[in-house]
Amino acid sequence: MNEKQSKLRAKDGLYIAMMIVPLVVAMIIKIVTTPASEGISISGARIFLEIPMPLMPLLITEAQVNSWLIMITILGVCLFLTNGIHENRGDWRQMGAEWLVEKLDGLVGENMEPVFHASYAPFVGAVMSLSVFSSLMSLFGVYPPTSDLNVVGGWAILVFILITKNKLKAGVGYYAKGYLEPIPVMLPMNIISEVATPVSMAFRHFGNVLSGSVISALVAWALAGASAALLGWLPGFLGEFPYLRVGLPAILSAYFDVFSGCIQAFIFSMLTMLYISGAYPGDELEARKARLAQQH
């Protein structure tokens, strides 16, 4: 093994650690910080730290910590897939990375105008991967950041900023005029419609992920109670073991955490592309170019 291969393998080990260690850390934090309790417990993200600020305290929550750990994991995956990449390499990792990039570019190209929006592919890929990884965290008993409205709301605000940026490309006057169409009396409704875009995106994603977690927890609790009622007469450990919780909660988790989580990530990404692309005033800009061409 030459020196170059040794360096590549050392980097591979580092990147694999970046993928695994954050998950282990999140699980340890969950175990250490969760107080002992009996029965079912459904609550939001725990607050780890409050930092005093002028207007209101800055809260460091479980969702924020897990989001950063997930971003480290995603970074490790990207670095692992692209480690030692070159034109003639052609191994499974490079082919996997190229396939992901091609699929993402194709998805963005189909739903956005490639001429104007090709640069949005990294943003869409980041949102989709972060959403998928966040929802999958619940498979390991870790609080999924997508169950926190503040996290998903932050993504929606970023999308709203990009939507507004595109609308402003035709000028502030054209953007303000849009609030008065089709008639000026529609101004309040147009403002509500504009604000409703990020709100609906955030609540749709947050609500579907949270409802899945709540339903899974309630079903697991109900099955444990049914198991105790039906088989609690068995002696010792045999009577305490929740037999009815074996199987069904895992199936529900596979649906809500894997299938539903991936679907919600896809829907959020699709809405991101459609809203941003639809906000681009292409017709107005083309009309301005035509008018300028006629004047000259």
Image (cartoon, rainbow, N blue to C red):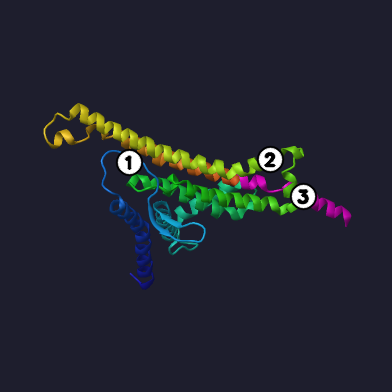
**Residue tagged by mark 2?**
188
Badge 1: residue crowd in 10 Å (few <14, some 14–19, many ≥20): few
Dot label at residue 153: none
Q: Secondary structure at mark 2?
A: helix
Task: Determine the CA span between mark 2 and mark 3.
Answer: 29 Å
Write down the region rendered in magenta. Answer: 274-296
Q: Quadrant of residue 260?
A: top left
First in sequence: mark 3 vs mark 1: 1
- The percent coordinates of residue 215 (x first, y second) are 38, 35
Q: Secondary structure at mark 3?
A: helix
Query: The disc labelled 3 sits on which kind of residue?
Result: Glu
Please give the name of the residue rendered at 45% of the width and 58% of the height, measured from the top-left corner.
Answer: 78
Examine the rendering and report whether any part of residue 292 can be seen. Answer: yes
Query: The disc labelled 2 sits on which kind of residue?
Result: Pro
Please give the name of the residue rendered at 70% of the width and 53% of the height, measured from the top-left corner.
Answer: 168
First in sequence: mark 2 vs mark 3: 2
In this image, 292 relative to 9: left or right?
right
Of the pair 156 and 39, the residue shown nearer to us: 39
**Residue tagged by mark 3?**
286
Q: Nearer the viewer, mark 2 or mark 3?
A: 2
**Residue tagged by mark 1?**
41
